[in-house]
Amino acid sequence: MAPYCQAASGFLPGIAGWIRPVMGRLTNSCDRGIDLAVTGKSIGIVTAFLGNLRAGTWVYTRNLLQGLAEQGVVRVDREERLLEGLEGIPAIILPGGGRLAKFTWPNRQLPEAGRRAGLDLVHVTTPYGSFRRTGFKKVITICDVTPLLFPEAHGRMNVWHHRFVLPAILRECDHIITISEASKRDIVRFYRVPEEKITVTLLAADRCFGSPVSPQAKLPTDRPYILNVGTLEPRKNLPCLLRAYAAARHSGLPHRLVVTGAKGWGASPLARLVADLHLDADVLFTGFIPDEEMPGLYAGAEFFVYPSLYEGFGLPVLEAMASGTPVITSNCSSLPEVAGEGALLVDPISEAELCAAMLALAGNMELLGTMRAKGLVQAARFRWERTTRETWGIYEKLLHGE
């Protein structure tokens, strides 16, 4: 039986009435370096099910749409909503799907509406694509395989989808995009996808990181601070960071540790660990910080530490380097290819290595300056314009039947 087919709700009658007339034509964009050979083709990028609008998938999708706006792409969603930075991009709204919309909508509403709206290609930037055969080309972006590696941090339906349904989606799609060579290796390993069906398009830090920041925008503190950014969940490896930080404090480290991010699965024990380590006056959990305040938070830190156990890319590392903030990060998954020579790499499960790296950087103006310069050089290698150009090249090849 086809996955989810019994759970899918009936398709909306008269779907054409839900589709706004949005098919813009391509315009001149020579300054973007994009070949306009696919002029006259209609391309939709799906923004449904992006979840946390601060997470890497949202940042990637927003920048991709902004970069392709002049090429006449449209946004496809299941609800009317204003998405920051995408206000001027036309949209096709396809309500429906019910409680299991994440799993049913891509296989019922999306294929039928895509045909009726005359879309030639649909790009889904989450794992919730269609396993049905459609009349348009299908591209899907898979950022990582965390539901397979860390199933305890994901809902059961999500894990089930990645184990049993996503393989069918990947077989039926025309091309797969991922965001690092490490993620490509994982997709090949877990899903047995031919390497030639996958293209890596790297991410970039937004332009606000690295722009001048006023002193008022920085975190007010009477002590220098070390920064960590990310959802508070087990794979971010915060218990190891806290224990390494406690050891560094005992060795004379004067810095505070500032941890920024929304609470995820497994966040509750962190407060107890801070108390057990007698770090209540030294560790600050800020919770959610608005986007506009993040550049100041990065710029004010003496250095940034990110000992994650696994990342599909690791965008905070790039944001820190672009901000001129020296970085300590893990020597595993995608992080070495993102950090390059612009960061100090450590074994994320070694508290001793992490402690030693923090003590080596703290107050060491020469090493801090060296790592700051290396980080800026590394961050400059990543540009959203390149991501856009390479993605457009994939569309072009598919629409020309190459």
Image: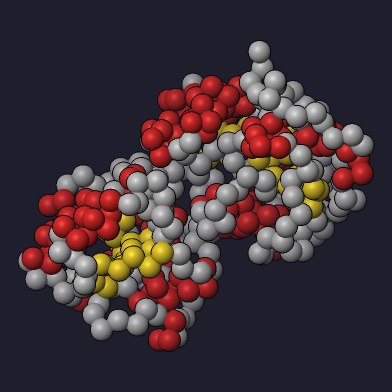
Residue 54 lies, in percent from the top left, at: 53, 58
Residue nearest the observer in this picture, 262 or 84:
262
Farthest left residue in view: 251
User: Quadrant of residue 6 in the image?
Assistant: top right
Look at the image and tell me whether residue 158 can be seen.
yes
Image height of 230 relative to 148, above or below? below
Image point (78%, 34%), residue name: 109
Residue nearest the observer in this picture, 321 or 279:
279
Residue nearest the observer in this picture, 222 or 123:
222
Residue 207 lies, in percent from the top left, at: 54, 68
Residue 55 lies, in percent from the top left, at: 51, 54
Look at the image and tell me whether residue 60 can be seen.
no
Image height of 384 relative to 165, above or below? below
User: Quadrant of residue 256 in the image?
Assistant: bottom left
Farthest top residue in view: 1
Image point (41%, 39%), residue name: 153
Q: Quadrant of the N terminus?
A: top right
Image point (48%, 74%), residue name: 293
Residue 14 lies, in percent from the top left, at: 92, 37
Residue nearest the observer in this picture, 137 or 106:
106
